[in-house]
Image (cartoon, coloured by chain):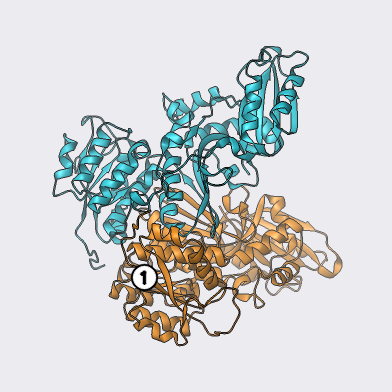
Chain colours: A cyan, B orange
Amino acid sequence: MTNLHRHAPLRVALVGLGTVGGGVIRLLETNGALIARRAGCPIQIVAISARDRNKDRGVDLSPYEWVDDMTTLAARDDVDVVVELIGGADGPALTLARQCLNAGKPFVTANKAMLAHHGLDLARLAETGGIALKYEAAVAGGIPVIKGMREGAAANEISRVYGILNGTCNYILTTMEKEGRSFADVLKEAQDLGFAEADPGIDIDGVDAAHKLSILASLAFGTELDFDAVATTGIRHVIAADIAEAAALGYRIRLVGMAQNAPVDGPDGGLFQRVHPMLVPLDHPLAHVDGSLNAVVAEGNFVGRLFFQGRGAGDDPTASAVVADLIDVARDEYGDAFAMPVAALTPHQSADAGARLGRAYLRFRVKDRPGVLAEIAAATRDAGVSIESMIQRGANQEDGVLVAIVTHAGAERCVRETLERLSGSDSLLEAPMVMHILD
Amino acid sequence: MTNLHRHAPLRVALVGLGTVGGGVIRLLETNGALIARRAGCPIQIVAISARDRNKDRGVDLSPYEWVDDMTTLAARDDVDVVVELIGGADGPALTLARQCLNAGKPFVTANKAMLAHHGLDLARLAETGGIALKYEAAVAGGIPVIKGMREGAAANEISRVYGILNGTCNYILTTMEKEGRSFADVLKEAQDLGFAEADPGIDIDGVDAAHKLSILASLAFGTELDFDAVATTGIRHVIAADIAEAAALGYRIRLVGMAQNAPVDGPDGGLFQRVHPMLVPLDHPLAHVDGSLNAVVAEGNFVGRLFFQGRGAGDDPTASAVVADLIDVARDEYGDAFAMPVAALTPHQSADAGARLGRAYLRFRVKDRPGVLAEIAAATRDAGVSIESMIQRGANQEDGVLVAIVTHAGAERCVRETLERLSGSDSLLEAPMVMHILD
C-alpha cells in the first residue's frame, strides 16, 4: 500500500511502566501498522520513564530512550504527548500532569484517583492551552464509556448513570454467589491469584469505584466533579447468607456506583452519588455481569437505556483505552475534557439521600432469644418502614440468628431511622446490613 | 450563567420529516440549552424540507423555514450542515448527499441503505472536501457503536463484530419465544402495533441488518465496504418448534449479523459477512437482548469482548444519535468517515464460508413413514457431518414429523452437502432449516 499517513508520527513519552505501561508498549508493537492507518500517522514511543530502571518488566525496553527525570519531559520538543501511568492522586503524577498541561503538552492518563481529586483543575489547564487531556482508561478500563458519555450520549439529559465499576469486587461477589463461599475466603483466593491487591482496601471499600463514579457524574450531568460528595460503602460486610437471601428473592448483589441528578427544586432534587452493594433484579443487565467484568448504564431522556459492558481492568484492556486516546490525539479529534468548558459546569447541590424513595434489604444478626423479632418489627413500624417480607433463618447458636427484611418502597430516611432505633439494642450481635434494591 | 459558547450557532437544514425527523426537532427543542453547553454553541434548525408540506407530523414546524426544493440547500451559505432523513439507497437522498459533499457541506445521515451501497463514494467526497460525513444513527439507532468501533476500539485488531441489528426481528423472535406463538401470528401483531412495516421484507428478510453489518465490518476491519458480499437469511422460516428445541438445548434464537476477518492465507481466511438466525447460548449476553433492543459485540485482541446494548430504532433514540453527530460537527471533532482514508481501506477477499468450523442446528419437516430418519442419518454420514444429538418429535399427521439435529463442530460445507444430498428426497415436506450455533 502507498503511504497514506498524512501526518508525522505522534511521539509519545510513557511514564510509569507497571502492567498497564507494559501493555501499552506491547499494544503499540503488536498493532502498530493498523493503528498508523487508523490514526493517520504512526504512534511511536520515544521516551520512557519509571521509578526503577532495573526492574524486569517482561518487555524489551531497549528500543526506547530511558529518561531518569520525568520532569524534563514537559519541555521536550521531540515529545508530542505524555502518557501517565504512575497512579496516585497526588505526588509525581500530579506534578507531571501540571507540568505537561502548563507547557502545552497533550496529556493522556489512566489515573482515576488524580482525576477524582484534581480533574477540574487539570481540565482548566488543558482548556487554557487548547490541548488534549484524555482519560478513557480511568473509568471501566477498556470500555469506551468516557467517550460514550462525553460524545455518544451527548444529546441527552441523563437522569442516572450507574454501573459496576470495580472488577475485583465483582469477581469476589460473583464467586461468592456461584460457590457459596465467604467473603474472606474468596478475597484470600483473589489475592493469591493476583486479582486483588495485598492491600485491598481501595477496591473492596468502594473507593476506586467512587473515583470513577465522580468522573462519570460530572460528564453525565455537566456538574462540577465532586468526589468528596460520593457516599461510599464497600463489600466487606456482605455475607454468604445475604447472597442466598437475595437469590431467593430474585436478585443478585453487585457493588453499584450510581449517580442521579434531579432539579434542585424537587423533593429529592440535587446530585446524588453513591457506591454501595445493591440488590439487582435478575431481569436487569447488571445482574448478568459476571467475574471481573465492568458495565455502565446511562439513562437518557431520548436514547433510553444504554448499556456498555467489557473488561474493566487488566493490562491489555486498559492499554486499549490509553491507545484509543492517543489515536484521538493523533486525529486531532478531542475537545473539553469534561465535555464543556470547566466554567460551564454547574456547581452542584448534593441531594438529600434520606428523601430518596426505594425498596431496601435489611439484614440483622441477632441473639437467638424470644422477643427479638418483635423488637425489630416495632422499630421498623415506629420509623415508618413498611415491610414487604421478613425471613428469619435458624443458624448455629454461636453465630446467632439471621433476620432479613425487604421493605416496600419508602423514603431512605425511614430505613436509617430504623437502624438508629435499634442501635442501642443488645439483641444485635453486629451492625445491621442495609442494601438498596435497584429499580 | 455567562455565555460560554465559543462559536456561532451551528445552522442545520433538516431534510425528511418522518418520525425520526420529528424526533430531531423535539430533541433540539427539549434539550437545546444543555446541547449548547456541550456543543460549545447552539444547534439551530434553520431550514426543513420534505416531500409533503401539508402532512400533519405532530410537531410545530412554523419556526422553521420550509424549503420546497432540497437541491438548493447544498449551496446555501446560511446552512452549516445538512441532516438527511429521507431514506432509500438511491434517489433523492443520494442526490442530496452528493450535492452537499461536493459543495463542501457537512452531512449527517441515518441512511444505512445509502451507506451500504454508496458509503465509500460518499466518504471519498467528504475526504476531498475535508468535511464531516457522519452516520451514527445508521447502525443500532441510539447506541454509539459507530463511535465505539471507529474510536473506542480503534487500538485493536478486531477478530469479529456481530450483533442484533434489527429490532423488528428481535421483537418477533423474543415474542415467539416468550409466548410460544407462530411467526405469522406475531408478525401480524407487530404490524398492527406499528412495530413492523406493512411491507416487512427489508426487516424480516435480514436486508436492513445486512446494510448495518456491512458498515460495521468496514469500520472494524479497515476493509472496503461490500454489501453485496453479505450472505443474508431472514427469520421467515423460524418456527415455534425451532425455538422450543433451541430452548431445550440451552439456546435462544436471535437474528445475528456477524462479520469476521482472518488472514487471507489461512484456511478460512478472508472476510466473512453473514446475517442469519443463530442459536445463542444462554451464557452469552446476546441471549438476554429482548424485545426491540439492539446489541453489538466487538472482539478485539487487546480489549477483549466489548458489548453495547440499547434501543436500536424509534424516533427518540435515533434522534439522539443524529444530534450526537451534530455535536461532534459543532465541536469540530470528526475525521474520516470509515476511520481512515478510503484509499487506505483494503480491498477484501471474501472468506469461504464452507471452510468455517462450527456447530449447527438442522431441522427437517418430514413425512411420517418408516426409513426417513435413516435417510437423514445416512445423508449426514455421507457428507461427513458428525451428529451430537438428534430428536424426532411426533406431530399431527398433516404437518408431518419434525426432526432436529445438532452437529458436532465441523466444516460448514459438510452441512451444505447434507442438504444437497437430501434435496431430491420426497420424504421432506419443505426445505430444511439450518441455523449455526454461536460459539
Asked if B218 appears above or below A218 in the picture, the reply is below
Q: Residue at x 58, y 70 (%)?
A: B206
Residue B39 in sight in this render: yes
Q: Position of residue B60 (x, y in %)?
A: 55, 74
Asked if B190 appears above or below A29 in the picture, the reply is below
Q: Residue at x 33, y 81 (%)?
A: B102
Q: Is residue A53 toward the left or the right of residue A418 in the image?
A: left
Residue B272 in sight in this render: no
Q: Position of residue A429 (x, y in %)?
A: 64, 15
Residue B277 or A126: which is nearer the viewer? A126
Residue B53 or A233: which is nearer the viewer? B53
The crowding category of the residue bearing disc 1, from other C-alpha atoms within 10 Å (few below 14, some 14 to 19, many at least 20), is few
| Number of numbered callouts drawn | 1
Question: Residue reaching furthest bottom?
Answer: B69
Asked if B65 appears above or below A43 in the picture, the reply is below
Q: Position of residue A124 (x, y in %)?
A: 29, 47
Q: Is residue A398 toward the left or the right of residue A352 in the image?
A: right
Residue B147 image-quadrant placement: bottom left
Q: Chain of mark 1?
A: B
Question: Residue reaching furthest right?
Answer: B397
Q: Position of residue B58 (x, y in %)?
A: 60, 74
Q: Amino acid at mark 1?
A: Pro
Quarter occupied by the N terminus of chain A: bottom left
Asked if B372 appears above or below A129 in the picture, the reply is below
Q: Residue at x 66, y 16 (%)?
A: A428
Q: Residue at x 71, y 12 (%)?
A: A397
Quarter occupied by the C terminus of chain A: top right
Q: State the SS at label 1.
A: loop
- Identify residue for label 1: B347
Residue A418 or A158: which is nearer the viewer? A418
Q: Is residue B323 toward the left or the right of residue A422 in the image?
A: left
